[in-house]
Amino acid sequence: MTLNKVVIVDDHPLFRQGLRDVLETDPGLKVVGEAATGEVAIDMADEIEPDVMLMDINLPDLNGLQVTRQIKARRPEIGVIVVTGYDDAEQAFHAIRAGASAYCPKDITPESLINTIYAVREGMYVVGERRMNHDEVVQWVEEKIGRISGQLTTDIEDSFVPLSPREMQILEYVTHGRSNKEIAYALGISHQTVKNHMTAILRKLQVEDRTQAAVYALSRGWVRLDKPLRD
């Protein structure tokens, strides 16, 4: 029997062990690695070349969507399953657009998780209880773009990844209470550049001010306050 190689990405050791225990009950699955940070996960994807990666959103360095995007850009054959405590329809949309094949809540049953892994290996997409083929997931994404953005747009990249790496970096500073001037100094860019990025962030997140942007990021696990800024 050819085993399906799985890597677990989550910063909580107890939760990783729980997932390992569940997966090891299935003879067709083999856990070949664990990562507590996004950077380690990206390295493991290159070194181990797993079939599937179980990905948390709320990681201490990069968030799970950023990690998923980078992994899929380098190793498109790897199936990424987002397993998160943030069971949110909009978050699921962003996860699929970032390249994930499935989006599951952390309270998923062991049987459903194992079935999801096999579905992903078969080329299917899974969001909650819904299982979709490629054409169906494309239609699902287009419907979500219409609901989230208000209209279908030709600038799909804005919907594919909510924020660019630089915008995510600035949002992290904002969430930590830094002013535009402080952000400009820390990143070595102009004050106007920071303002331009903030305008783009507010537009993409469809919020009115930096406080709402910070709340948006925290509520979805994109930014963690316990992660120190690298000034």
Image (cartoon, helix red, strand yellow):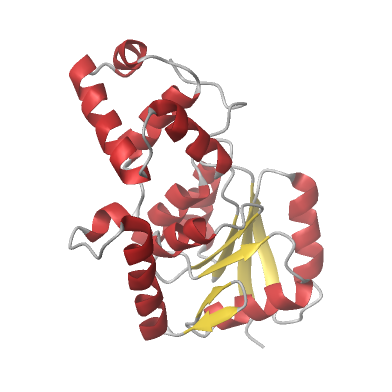
Residue drawn at (36%, 34%), measured in percent from left and top?
Answer: 208
Does 88 sit above or below residue 219? below
Number of residue marks: 0
In which quadrant of the rendered image does the N terminus lie?
A: bottom right
Residue drawn at (50%, 44%), measured in percent from left and top?
Answer: 63
Residue 135 is situated, as x and y percent measured from the top left of the image, at 36, 84
Q: Residue furthest bottom?
A: 1
Locate residue 152 relative to residue 55 in the image: left or right: left
To which quarter of the image does residue 107 belong? bottom right
Whether residue 104 is visible: yes
Residue 182 is situated, as x and y percent measured from the top left of the image, at 36, 11
Locate residue 53 relative to residue 133 in the image: left or right: right
Does 129 sit above or below residue 207? below
Residue drawn at (48%, 17%), measured in percent from left and top?
Answer: 177
Q: Nearer the viewer, residue 135 or 15?
A: 135
Whether residue 29 is visible: no
Residue 59 is situated, as x and y percent measured from the top left of the image, at 58, 42
Q: Nearer the viewer, residue 184 or 70?
A: 184
Residue drawn at (55%, 36%), measured in percent from left and top?
Answer: 218
To which quarter of the image does residue 173 belong? top left
In which quadrant of the rendered image does the C terminus lie?
A: top left
Does 20 sit above or below residue 172? below
